[in-house]
Image (cartoon, rainbow, N blue to C red):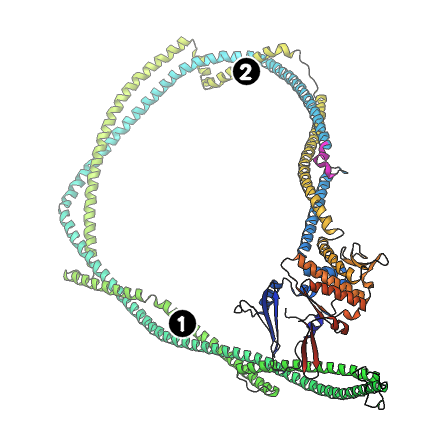
């Protein structure tokens, strides 16, 4: 396994031979057999303290494992035991022999956990506890929710076992109360309707009475006014007769007025005809004069058209000259702009060259910056390496000083050991001489020598030297202490030397990697200072470079900005060039047009043409207007004369007709007066009232319509109305308000009860859900509670499994112990604990047949403890071999412990071990007891030679 048998040696790391040179490697090789298969393992410790491992099988030596972890895993799989199990079962180390016997319950649990891997049972125990806690928490939560719902319902003292039935009584009571309230509400609604009906009937009675009284008063008023309207009806008939006569009178008056008007119009027409005749003669003469002037009008119009054509071309000539001048100005302006932009174009080309130079400078500075940063990073890394190298060199010097100091201490110890060794040898010689002198002093002739058996004693006894046994023991003890101290000191020196060599090697490697050849602290300090100065210079250079980069960046940005502005200005260059070309083309067209107009004889100045055209236009317009006016005036005069002549004839004819109509109407008027039997005086007195006929007629019709309506209503209401009496509504309304208030209170109470029932039903449903969950969780909790009680209360599940294994170990251990103690002692598992911290089932007592009582194993003597421990170790070995079918324990080693046994106990222990050996198992005993060595048939004897190491001698049948 790559470890020592005892924890003390493992911690001390004292496996390296003190006789080996410092540069030599330590090696241990072991060949072992399991189930007929031979395996080989070799472990190596290098001079620098590095561990290596090699493993292979006899049948397949080429399959070599060289990684320590792989080797250890393979060994565990082959043997079937890990290191801790192996130390408890196969190789029982010195000092740990009684560990399992005297261990407390917790330590036994840890040991059994390692041996039998019972962690899974502990995990299962914790899983059961977690589920139990979760289920119990769910149970408490469901009970809490149940109580909250019950409390919300205004109840208490209910058990969750009742489930939703806990609310049934309250729910039924509330539903019965709702039913009673609904009955009361129905009665109140019926009563309310009756009162409302009575109020409606009383209101109708009072309304009918009030209506009858009003109708009666209205009928009396109409009856008083009836005679007045009968007189008005007679007056209306007279006015209707007069109205028929006034129409004829009006027609007569209209005809007489028409005759007068016609006579006046005829007189006016006669005068207008005289005036028109005179004006028409003047218009005829004016028309003849203007007609004579208009004979030359066409010639003047032709001349005018010719002059207007010349005037248009002259204007076009002037416009073309103006446009040409304007285009010429535009061309000059465009040339100036083009010249300015071409200068900017040249500036842009120059700036682009500057931009390339600035970009190149910026890139050069950035490349330089990257190189500086890389050098700075390398310098920083080198500085860190120098600090690490300096620290290692400083530590190396400290280690070297410690080595010098330790070697001086080693030399002192060596000198002291030499002195003590010489004194010890001197005392040994004195003791040996004294033993020989004492033996010779007791010899007599004819008596055999106890050493050689000779009957002759030629040597004579000499004087006994002074010898002190205490001094010899003190010297032996002092020598052992000095040897131990010297070995420890040498080990410390070697460790420090290895540390020094490792540091020196690391320093040398770091020096080679960084090109450093000197490793003195002062030289490293100087090199580090130079490197620090170099780092500072690089930082300054980086700062200067960053300033240059910023300057180049600013310069490049300024150039780019100017380039951007120039490119923006030059964006219109193409448009300007295109505009310039178009302007030149238009100027050429205009020049051609001007030449053509000048060739046609078009004058450049148009002022004379305009005057001539205006004069001709004035003359033509004047003659045309006068001719038109004269024609129009003559035609108007002629038309007016003809019109007036026709009007005059029509008026004379109308006048004759009007005289005839007036005479007929006058005769008709007098005849109608006679027919209507209306006197002329009465007619004249009432004819002004004819306009009021409609008003009087409407008043009469309205009165009699109202009179007849009121009379009809009165006649229909009189029979019942005379019997009606007024009734008071206040008591009925008070009763209705009281009933409505009671009904509102009952409805509010019903609403509260409905809400209560709704909440109770909802709570009943929730209780049902909670109760189902409670029963489901309760069923689960019963199972988990049983598992929890089994796994956690009293003896834990893991402890129970461990106690099963422990019981099996004790059964096999007691078989051995009974033989070793001749039936006196028996190991028993303790089922009770002395305190709560101990685990039940792993305590250990011993039953004494002599006393018939049990007692703690701690009370056993040293020899008894050894026998009990040996029995327990052998029982453990037997149990594991029988429990694990893959593990075949053919060998067991026992380190020391036999020195505490008396002769009988030693015989019994050896007898048990020999029986074990006779059963086919190899039993290895590591011991210094002389009696035990003599009784073991096969031995490997290890002896040490001072200054030369150890020797192994094989005795017996190994």
Q: Residue at x 32, y 67 (%)?
A: 573
Q: Which residue is mark 1?
A: 562
- Which residue is denoted by mark 2 in the rendering? 706
Inspect this view and state whether residue 866 appears. no
Q: Quadrant of residue 747?
A: top right
Secondary structure that dominates the magenta span: helix
- The quadrant holding residue 464 is bottom right
Q: Nearer the viewer, residue 207 or 418?
A: 418
Callout 1–callout 2 Cβ contact below 8 Å: no
Location of the C terminus by quadrant is: bottom right
What span is colored magenta in the figure? 159-168
Q: Give the residue at the far front of this rendering.
A: 446
**Image x and y of residue 868, in percent:** 77, 63
The correct choice, above or below, for 496 with respect to 208 in the image is below
Q: Residue 738 in the image: state x and y as whole percent.
A: 72, 25
Queried whether the magenta region covers residue 926, the answer comes back as no
Residue 841: x %, y % from top left: 76, 55
Which secondary structure, mark 2?
helix
Question: Quick one: 956 or 312, which is closer to the camera?
Answer: 956
Question: Residue 166 magenta-drawn?
Answer: yes
């Amino acid at each position: 396994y790559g470890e020592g048998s005892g924890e003390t040696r493992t911690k001390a790391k004292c496996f390296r031979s003190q006789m080996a040179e410092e540069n030599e490697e330590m090696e241990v090789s072991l060949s072992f057999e399991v189930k007929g298969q031979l395996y080989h393992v070799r472990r190596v410790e290098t001079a620098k303290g590095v561990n290596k491992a090699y493993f292979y099988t006899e049948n397949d030596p080429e399959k070599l494992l060289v990684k320590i972890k792989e080797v250890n895993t393979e060994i565990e799989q082959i043997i079937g035991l890990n290191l801790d199990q192996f130390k408890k079962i196969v190789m029982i180390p010195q000092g740990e022999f009684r560990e399992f016997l005297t261990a407390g319950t917790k330590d036994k649990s840890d040991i059994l956990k390692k041996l039998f891997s019972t962690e899974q049972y502990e995990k299962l125990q914790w899983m059961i506890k977690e589920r139990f806690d979760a289920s119990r928490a769910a149970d408490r939560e469901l009970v809490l929710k149940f109580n909250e719902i019950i409390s919300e319902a205004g109840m208490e003292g209910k058990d969750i076992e009742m489930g939703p039935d806990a609310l049934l009584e309250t729910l039924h009571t509330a539903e019965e109360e709702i039913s009673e309230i609904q009955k009361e509400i129905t009665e109140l609604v019926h009563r309310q309707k009756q009162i409302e009906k009575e109020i409606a009937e009383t209101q109708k009675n009072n309304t009918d009475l009030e209506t009858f009284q009003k109708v009666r008063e209205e009928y009396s008023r109409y009856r008083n006014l009836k005679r007045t309207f009968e007189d008005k009806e007679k007056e209306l008939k007279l006015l209707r007769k007069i109205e028929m006569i006034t129409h004829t009178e009006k027609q007569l008056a209209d005809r007489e007025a028409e005759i007068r008007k016609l006579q006046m119009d005829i007189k006016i027409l006669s005068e207008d005809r005289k005036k028109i005749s005179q004006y028409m003669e003047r218009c005829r003469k004016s028309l003849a004069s203007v007609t004579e002037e208009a004979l030359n009008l066409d010639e003047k119009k032709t001349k005018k058209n010719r002059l207007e054509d010349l005037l248009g071309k002259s204007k076009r000539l002037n416009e073309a000259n103006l446009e040409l001048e304007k285009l010429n100005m535009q061309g000059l302006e465009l040339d100036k702009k083009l010249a300015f932009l071409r200068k900017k174009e040249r500036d842009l080309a120059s700036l682009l060259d500057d931009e390339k130079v600035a970009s190149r400078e910026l890139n050069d500075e950035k490349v330089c910056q990257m190189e500086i940063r890389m050098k700075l990073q390398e310098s920083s890394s080198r500085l860190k390496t120098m600090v690490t190298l300096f620290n290692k060199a400083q530590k190396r010097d400290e280690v070297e000083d410690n080595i010098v100091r330790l070697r001086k201490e080693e030399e002192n110890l060596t000198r002291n050991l030499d002195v003590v060794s010489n004194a010890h040898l001197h005392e040994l010689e004195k003791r040996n001489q004294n033993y020989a002198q004492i033996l010779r002093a007791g010899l007599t002739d004819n008596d055999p020598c106890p050493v050689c058996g000779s009957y002759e004693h030629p040597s004579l006894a000499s004087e006994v030297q002074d010898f002190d046994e205490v001094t010899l023991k003190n010297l032996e003890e002092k020598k052992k202490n000095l040897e131990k101290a010297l070995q420890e000191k040498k080990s410390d020196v070697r460790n420090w030397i290895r540390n020094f060599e490792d540091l020196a090697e690391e320093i040398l490697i770091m020096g080679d990697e960084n090109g450093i050849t000197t490793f003195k602290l002062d030289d490293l300090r100087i090199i580090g200072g130079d490197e620090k100065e170099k780092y500072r210079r690089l930082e300054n250079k980086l700062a200067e470079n960053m300033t240059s980069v910023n300057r180049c960046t600013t310069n490049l940005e300024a150039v780019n900005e100017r380039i951007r502005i120039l490119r923006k200005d030059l964006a219109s260059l193409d448009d300007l060039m295109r505009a310039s070309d178009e302007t030149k083309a238009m100027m050429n067209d205009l020049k051609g047009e001007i030449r053509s107009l000048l060739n046609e004889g078009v004058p450049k100045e148009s002022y004379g043409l305009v005057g001539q055209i205006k004069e001709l236009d004035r003359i033509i317009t004047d003659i045309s207007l006068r001719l038109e006016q004269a024609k129009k005036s003559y035609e108007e005069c002629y038309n007016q004369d003809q019109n007036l002549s026709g009007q005059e004839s029509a008026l004379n004819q109308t006048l004759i007709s009007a005289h005839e109509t007036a005479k007929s109407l006058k005769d008709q008027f007098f005849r109608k007066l006679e027919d209507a039997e209306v006197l002329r005086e009465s007619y004249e007195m009432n004819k002004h009232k004819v306009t009021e006929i409609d008003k009087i007629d409407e008043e009469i019709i309205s009165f009699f319509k109202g009179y007849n309506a009121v009379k009809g209503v009165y006649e229909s209401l009189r029979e019942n109305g005379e019997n009606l009496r007024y009734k008071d509504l206040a008591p009925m309304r008070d009763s209705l308000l009281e009933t409505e208030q009671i009904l509102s209170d009952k409805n509010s109470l019903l609403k509260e009860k409905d809400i209560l029932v709704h909440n109770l039903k909802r709570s009943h449903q929730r209780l049902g859900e909670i109760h189902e969950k409670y029963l489901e969780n309760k069923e689960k909790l019963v199972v988990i509670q049983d598992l929890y009680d089994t796994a956690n209360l009293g003896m834990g599940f893991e402890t129970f499994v461990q106690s099963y294994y422990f019981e099996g170990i004790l059964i096999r251990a007691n078989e051995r112990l009974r033989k070793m103690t001749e039936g006196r002692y028996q190991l028993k598992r303790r089922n009770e604990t002395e305190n709560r911290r101990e685990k039940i089932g792993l305590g250990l007592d011993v039953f004494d047949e002599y006393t018939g009582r049990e007692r703690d194993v701690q009370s056993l003597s040293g020899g008894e403890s050894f026998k009990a421990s040996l029995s327990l170790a052998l029982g453990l070995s037997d149990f594991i071999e029988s429990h694990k079918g893959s593990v075949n324990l053919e060998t067991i080693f026992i380190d020391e412990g036999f020195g505490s046994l008396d002769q009988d106990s030693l015989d019994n222990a050896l007898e048990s071990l020999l029986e074990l050996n006779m059963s086919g198992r190899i039993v290895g005993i590591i011991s210094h007891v002389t009696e035990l060595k003599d009784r073991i048939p096969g031995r490997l004897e290890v002896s040490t030679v001072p200054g030369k190491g150890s020797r192994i001698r094989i005795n017996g049948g190994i």
